[in-house]
Amino acid sequence: MEKREDKFSPIIRRDTTWRSRGTRGVILVVLWGFIALVVLANLGFGLGWYSDSLVSLYLLFNLKVHGDSQLLLFIGILAVLTPIFCGWRWYRLSQKGGHR
C-alpha cells in the first residue's frame, strides 16, 4: 500500500508578468514614500523642527499640527486588525478546498 502525504500549503502561487510585478512595485514604493513623508512631517513638528520644506509638506498633505494622536490611533487599529484578518484568512485557506 502506498502512503500518500497530503501537505498543507496555504500559499497560493501564480506566475505574474514582469509588467504587473513592476507596476505593483512602483505603486508600493510610491505609497511607502508618501507614508515616510507624512511620518517625517509629524515627527518634525513634534520635535520642533520648523523649516520651509516641513511647512510645505504640511500644506501639501493638509495635515493638522496635532494630528499625531489620530495617526497613532489609526496605526494601533491597523496593528490589531491585521493579525486578526491574517488569522481568519489562514483558517479559511487551511479548510479543505481553500474557500475563496
Image (cartoon, rainbow, N blue to C red):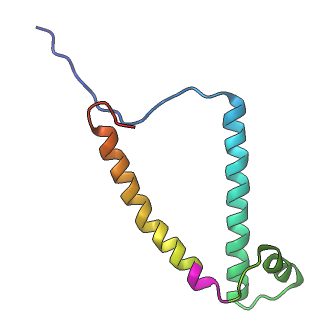
Could you tell whether 68 is left or right of 90 in the image? Answer: right
Q: Position of residue 22 (x, y in %)?
A: 71, 38
Give the number of marks: 0
Residue sitting farthest toward the bottom: 48
Q: Residue furthest top?
A: 1
Q: Main secondary structure of the magenta part?
A: helix
Magenta stretch holds residue 97: no
92 versus 31 height, above or below? above
Q: Position of residue 16 (x, y in %)?
A: 61, 28
Q: Is residue 29 above or below residue 96?
A: below
Q: Residue furthest right?
A: 52
Q: Position of residue 81 (x, y in %)?
A: 42, 64
The answer to which image quadrant residue 20 occupies is: top right
Residue toward you, 63 or 2: 63
Quarter holding the C terminus is: top left
From what the image shows, is residue 1 above or below residue 94? Answer: above
Q: Residue at x 53, y 73 (%)?
A: 74
Q: Quadrant of the N terminus?
A: top left
Q: Position of residue 79 (x, y in %)?
A: 45, 67
| Front one among 87 and 39 | 87
Magenta part of the protein: which range? 66-70
Q: Seen in the image, is 50 located left or right of residue 70?
A: right
Residue plotted at (89% across, 83% down)? 52
